[in-house]
Image (spheres, helix red, strand yellow):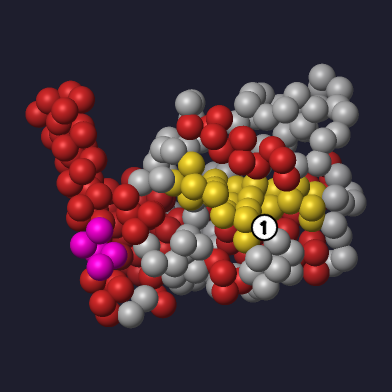
Amino acid sequence: MAAALPSDQPVYEIWWPNVDDQVHYPTVEQLADRFLPEIRKLQPQGPYQFCGYSTFGLVAYEMGRRLIAEGQDVSFLALFDIWHPQFLDTLTGPERARYKALRVIDRLGKYRRAFKAGGVSKMMSHLAEFAINKARSVGWRLTQSGFRLAGRPIPKGMQTVASIAANKTYVPSPYPRRFILIRTEDLLDRKLNDCTVGWDECAPSGIDLYFIDGDHGTIKDEPFVRGLVERISPHLAAAPISSTDRTP
């Protein structure tokens, strides 16, 4: 994404922390606690511009909200394909059933496309990946209490599902300014009744919503990242930079 942005736009990347030795996966609030001091070292005062992909969208949202509450200027916030953590919990029974049906249709469509692209082996690879991820999710739900009681760190194979579980504990407070929400053009996303996937409850000033080609795993990559950058670039504040200000 940095390479696709205008050349006068400085970019700074926040690295996800190593959690190999942690018993409890860090919450969104704890990640914001960790990153904000580092951001202030780099830039003590606003305006700040934040964007976040998937889980990091929640962290970007929380950091922006806190800085605004402190009186700082956060001129830009963009969330890339992240749902409000409690969105599914707010669905009615019929809406939830419809969502699950759409998930099945969407997954079958992906398997069909995989079969057309690479035959049986490609389709079986997708099926195996799905089965492994589902097993990890079930395993984490069954064993997380045991790991915590024993004081054992989160196994690497379960860290992704542990992060998803931690995300669902985050309850976003309203964001006082308008922000951007990027979603994908796939069947599942387009068929949901709430096009903001729950974020309208947190947006008294409104949301700029854009759909782009690709899916959750590909919107950050070529060629789909070009569409993402086209959507957010008009909202960014240009700033002259030196060649050392841009990170790869």
The residue positioned 90% from the left and 51% from the top of the image is: 45
Q: Evaluate whether residue 208 shows in this view.
A: yes
At which x and y percent is residue 244? Answer: 81, 22
Of residues 147 and 196, the one drawn nearer to the viewer in this rendering: 196
Left or right: residue 241 versus residue 124 is right
Camera sees residue 132: no
Q: Residue at x 16, y 28 (%)?
A: 116
Residue 223 image point, x, y percent: 48, 26
Q: Residue furthest bottom?
A: 92
Identity of the residue drawn at 51% across and 35% down: 220
Along the line of sight, the residue nearer the viewer: 29 or 126: 126
Magenta run includes residue 241: no
For image coordinates 85% across by 50% down, the residue present is 47
What's drawn in magenta, residue-wise?
Answer: 98-102
Q: Is residue 35 above or below residue 111?
A: below
Image quadrant in which the C terminus is located = top right
The quarter of the picture where residue 177 lies is bottom right
Q: Check disc 1 and give the amino acid type.
A: Phe
- Image quarter where the N terminus lies is top right
Question: Left or right of 127: which side holds 180?
Answer: right
Q: Quadrant of residue 74?
A: bottom right
Q: Is residue 99 magenta?
A: yes
Q: Main secondary structure of the magenta part?
A: helix
Q: Closest to the observer: 68 or 233?
A: 233
Disc 1 element: strand
The image quarter in which residue 181 lies: bottom right
**Residue located farthest toward the left when viewing the structure as drawn:** 120
Q: Is residue 189 above or below residue 223?
A: below
Disc 1: which residue:
179
Q: Residue 24 location, x and y as percent?
A: 49, 62
Give the image location of residue 174, x and y in percent.
66, 73
Q: Is residue 184 left or right of residue 244?
A: left
